[in-house]
Image (tube, rainbow, N blue to C red):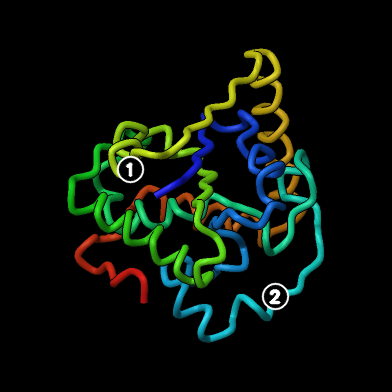
Amino acid sequence: MPSTSTTSIRRARTGPQPSPLWPRGTFRSLTYRDMPIALAPNLWRRLGGGNRRSQGPREWVHVDRPLVDADSPEGLEEVFWRIFDGQCYVAADHLAPHRPDAETLLRYQACIGAMLAADEGRKRHYLSKNNNAILRLDSVRQALPEAVILIPVRLPTAHAAALLRQHRNFLKQQDEDGFVRCLQERALDRTLRPRDPGRAGTLGT
């Protein structure tokens, strides 16, 4: 199926890349409107949950990209990989190169198919923005042979400065807001303890 994937290491400016494509209306991506049931887009559409979100544009938590709203593309497809194959690439202190098996790739294709079907055929091109896709580029190419993969690269000095800026940004947010500190501690704990794939549900409901 036609698809475009933008991926790179953190702070490499993958975020703004889909923007010129997105307004054309032919691309389907996971957005904040698909939360909290990102892997069941048809069910969420039938429940009408996503359609109730009318939040206007607001500043992103990283304060370094254009304003975002409920329809902004986000790397939510990583939820799929964490649930179905997290134990294969999430280590205690790093993320390892990821080579999902054939069954997992078929599930991934089914997930994308469900996303496209949720829009009743109006959008036929899948658009992915996921930094962690760089861990599994060969597998993405295998699952989506028609995919165009974009890998932004920044000047090393600018990239290092962006990482330092975000480190200071989140240190400040944690000092000023206990909720942010608690949320990040919980997110880190869950990242280092991937879910048992035996408990995973069914896609495309």
Alpha carbon separation for disc pair 2 and 1: 32 Å
Q: In this orientation, which residue lies closer to the viewer: 134 or 94?
A: 134
Toward the viewer: 158 or 102? 102
Q: Give how far across and how far down residue 128 sits, in percent.
A: 51, 47
Q: Is residue 87 left or right of residue 115?
A: left
Considering the image in quadrants, where does the C terminus appear? bottom left
How crowded pointer 2 is (Cα within 10 Å; few <14, some 14-19, many 20+) is rated as some
Q: Residue at x 64, y 28 (%)?
A: 163
Q: How many marks?
A: 2
Q: State the image quarter where residue 91 is shown.
A: top left
Q: Which mark is residue 90?
A: 1
The amino acid pointed to by label 1 is Val
Image x and y of residue 110, in percent: 32, 61
* Residue visible at 72% across and 30% down in the picture: 165
Q: Secondary structure at mark 2?
A: loop
Q: Is residue 47 above or below residue 109?
A: below
Q: Indicate left or right for 125 with 40 as reference.
A: right
Q: Which mark is residue 146?
A: none
Q: Position of residue 114 (x, y in %)?
A: 40, 66
- Residue drawn at x 27%, y 67% as measured from the top left: 200
Q: Is residue 186 left or right of residue 100?
A: right
Q: Residues within 10 Å of mark 1 (few under 14, many from 20)?
A: some
Residue at 59 percent across and 21 percent down: it is 153
Q: Position of residue 56 (x, y in %)?
A: 81, 65
Looking at the image, residue 112 sits to the left or right of residue 186; the answer is left
* Mark 2 residue type: Arg
The residue where tag 2 is placed is: 53
The front one of 42 and 179 is: 42
